[in-house]
Amino acid sequence: MTDQNDSAKAFPDIEIYVKRVEMEAVSNWLAQYFKIIETKDTREGVVFELKNKDEEAFQCVVAENIVKGGYASIWFKKNATQWPTDRDCAVDAYEHFDLEVRCSTGGWNGEDEGGWFRFIDNEIKTVNWF
């Protein structure tokens, strides 16, 4: 796993996709790491107003069935998380939910290859999703 204190390589936002995850499970996962200040239903999805351990406020938007196959998008609009990259967050989510998780292989350094990491059956595979 990537060093969580390496802020020079941290992505500005984090987004992962979890297959057929329930909103209550997502809420419980978020509550493990963050203080949930408020949740509200919006056109984007369910918006969680969060605070991290440093009391920094930020939002996480969870949109159910956003991609064919029953994938929910979990998008931290600002990366105030402990995960430097989408991949780091996806690893944690996969271990917690024990469901298929996907995230982009590309980073924020202009080297986006357009692929996706697929976490399933205790393996990480690179796939062309779309």
Image: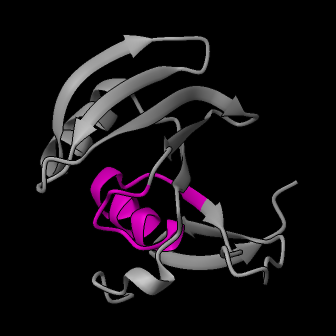
Residue at x 70%, y 81% (from the top left corner)? 109
Q: Is residue 81 left or right of residue 18?
A: left
Residue at x 56%, y 26% (from the top left corner)? 64
Residue lying at the far right of the rendered structure? 130
- Count the labels in the image: 0
Q: Is residue 90 above or below residue 78?
A: below
Residue 40 location, quadrant: top left
Q: Is residue 108 left or right of residue 120?
A: right
Name the colouring of the figure. Answer: one colour
Q: Is residue 101 above or below residue 48?
A: below
User: What segment is highlighted magenta in the picture?
Assistant: 79-102
Residue 43 location, quadrant: top right
Residue 60 location in percent, x, y?
41, 37
Residue 117 location, quadrant: bottom right
Q: Is residue 105 left or right of residue 16?
A: right
Residue at x 46%, y 63% (from the top left corner)? 90
In the picture, which quadrant includes the C terminus? bottom right
Q: Would you say residue 73 sits in the magenta stretch?
A: no
Residue 39 location in percent, x, y?
30, 18
Q: Is residue 97 above or below residue 89?
A: above
Viewer-closest of 74 and 123? 74
Q: Is residue 39 left or right of residue 47?
A: left
In the picture, which quadrant includes the N terminus? bottom left
Residue 91 location in percent, x, y?
41, 69
Residue 83 location in percent, x, y?
36, 68
